[in-house]
Image (cartoon, rainbow, N blue to C red):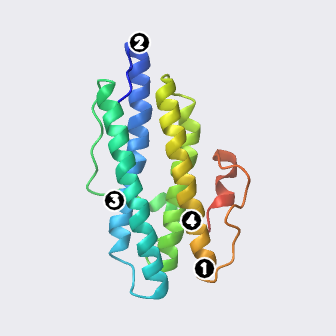
């Protein structure tokens, strides 16, 4: 993997903190896809959401490994997956739920958009150019996940723009999510 020679211990600690924050959101995404997947029905919508969720979760697991390796290479300890995650803030804001197939898809969309936005904003806090590149690359995949979910809504007859804003960042986050 990348070499972090020449980085100060203080810069390494900053990068470890940023990467562990990213890892938290990857782990929460993996957990949510597992929990929500068990609640999907055998309907056309449920099957479509489950297939897409499996693909997205596989990417999140790869991101988890990449982030964990980078944290260890920096001399840090990656955080571990929690037994459960609190999704109540997303649910309270109407950004999805686990009570129906469509609302699970909306929740997945909110999580993917949140991850992409988080990577975009956090990449500028990193000290290692290699890690800026890693986070930017993962942000691209998270944005692809969001666009794929939005495209799936169209396939299911819920017509929305796949790319609702030419920018995905903190300011445009609400343009990308679909409210319950």
- Tell me where residue 45 appears, x and y as whole percent: 49, 83
User: Does the rendering let one see residue 12?
Assistant: yes
Please name the residue that numbered disc 4 is placed on. Answer: 148
Which callout, 2 or 3, points to the residue nearer the camera?
Answer: 2
Q: CA distance from mark 4 to mark 1?
A: 10 Å
* Residue at 27% from the left image edge and 32% from the top image edge: 77
Residue at horizontal 33 percent and vertical 66 percent from the top: 34
The CA span between labels 2 and 4 is: 40 Å
Q: In the image, residue 52 lies at what x, y percent?
A: 46, 69
| Gap between marks 2 and 3 measured at Cα | 34 Å
Q: Earlier in the sequence, mark 2 or mark 4?
A: 2
Q: Residue at x 41, y 55 (%)?
A: 59
Which quadrant: the C terminus?
bottom right
- Give the label on residue 155, or none: 1
Q: Nearer the viewer, mark 3 or mark 4?
A: 4
User: Contact, CB < 8 Å: mark 4 with mark 1?
Assistant: no
Q: Secondary structure at mark 4?
A: helix
Q: Give me the residue at 49% from left, 45% from top.
A: 138
Instruction: Indicate which disc, 2 or 1, sits on the residue closer to the N terminus.
Output: 2
Q: Nearer the viewer, residue 30 or 141?
A: 141
In this figure, which residue is indicated by the disc labeled 3?
31
- Observer-nearest of 2 and 52: 2
* Label 2, residues with CA under 10 Å away: few <14, some 14-19, many ≥20: few
């Amino acid at each position: 993997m990348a070499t972090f020679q020449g980085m100060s211990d203080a810069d390494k600690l900053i990068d470890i903190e940023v990467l562990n924050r990213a890892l938290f959101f990857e782990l929460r995404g993996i957990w949510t896809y597992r929990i929500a997947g068990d609640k999907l029905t055998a309907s056309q919508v449920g099957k479509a959401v489950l297939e897409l969720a499996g693909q997205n979760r596989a990417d999140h697991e790869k991101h988890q490994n990449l982030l964990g390796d980078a944290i260890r290479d920096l001399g840090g300890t990656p955080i571990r997956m929690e037994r459960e995650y609190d999704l109540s803030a997303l649910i309270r804001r109407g950004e999805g739920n686990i009570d129906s197939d469509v609302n699970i898809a909306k929740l997945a969309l909110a999580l993917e958009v949140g991850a992409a936005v988080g990577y975009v904003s956090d990449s500028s806090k990193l000290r290692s150019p290699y890690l800026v590149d890693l986070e930017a690359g993962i942000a691209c995949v998270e944005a692809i996940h969001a666009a794929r979910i939005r495209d799936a809504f169209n396939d299911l007859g819920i017509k929305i723009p796949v790319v609702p804003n030419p920018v995905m960042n903190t300011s445009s986050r609400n343009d990308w999510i679909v409210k319950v």
